[in-house]
Image (cartoon, helix red, strand yellow):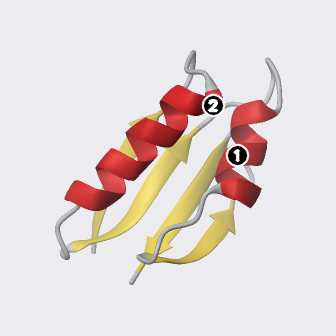
Amino acid sequence: MYRRTIDLHGMTVAEARRAMQALLKSCPASVREIEVIHGSHSGQALLRYVRTELKHPRISRKILGLNNGVTILELK
């Protein structure tokens, strides 16, 4: 299983949205997971975007781990 990681720290929600859409669009079919590092201590906007607003046809589910600053996207 192949995994990609993206770090959204320091981005605005608009920047994160563009970065996530670009990554999801360009991700090869061999990539089955994306680890999204959004942080959780300096605001909740990125966390909220990734966990509730982010939609894409390749995302089959979102996995919330023990680290509240990371969300795993499982891809189809």
Helix or strand or loop: what does disc 1 sit on? helix
Do residues under tags 2 and 1 come within 8 Å of each other at their CB atoms?
Answer: yes
Q: Which residue is rendered at x = 55% and y = 60% of the image?
A: 72
Please state, as top left, top right, bottom left or bottom right, where the N terminus lies in the image: bottom left
Looking at the image, residue 41 sits to the left or right of residue 19; the answer is: right
> Which residue is painted at 43% across and 46% down in the image?
20
For label 1, count other residues whose C-alpha is less than 10 Å away and answer few (under 14), some (14-19) or many (20+).
Answer: some
What's the residue at 75%, 54% (across, down)? 66
Residue 35 at what x, y percent from top left?
A: 47, 52
Work out whether residue 27 or residue 35 is closer to the camera in this orientation and state it: 27
61 sits to left or right of 5: right
Give how far across and how far down residue 67 sits, in percent: 71, 45
Please, what secondary structure does the residue beneath circle 2 have? Answer: helix
Q: Is residue 4 above or below residue 58?
A: above
Determine the residue positioned at 69% across, 35% down. Answer: 46
- Residue identified by numbered label 2: 13
Q: Is residue 46 visible?
A: yes
Query: Alpha carbon of mark 2 to alpha carbon of mark 1: how far?
Result: 7 Å
In this figure, which residue is indicated by the disc labeled 1? 49
Q: Quadrant of the C terminus?
A: bottom left
> Can residue 4 be seen from the camera position used here?
no
Marked residue nearer the N-terminal end (2 or 1): 2
Q: Amino acid at mark 2?
A: Val
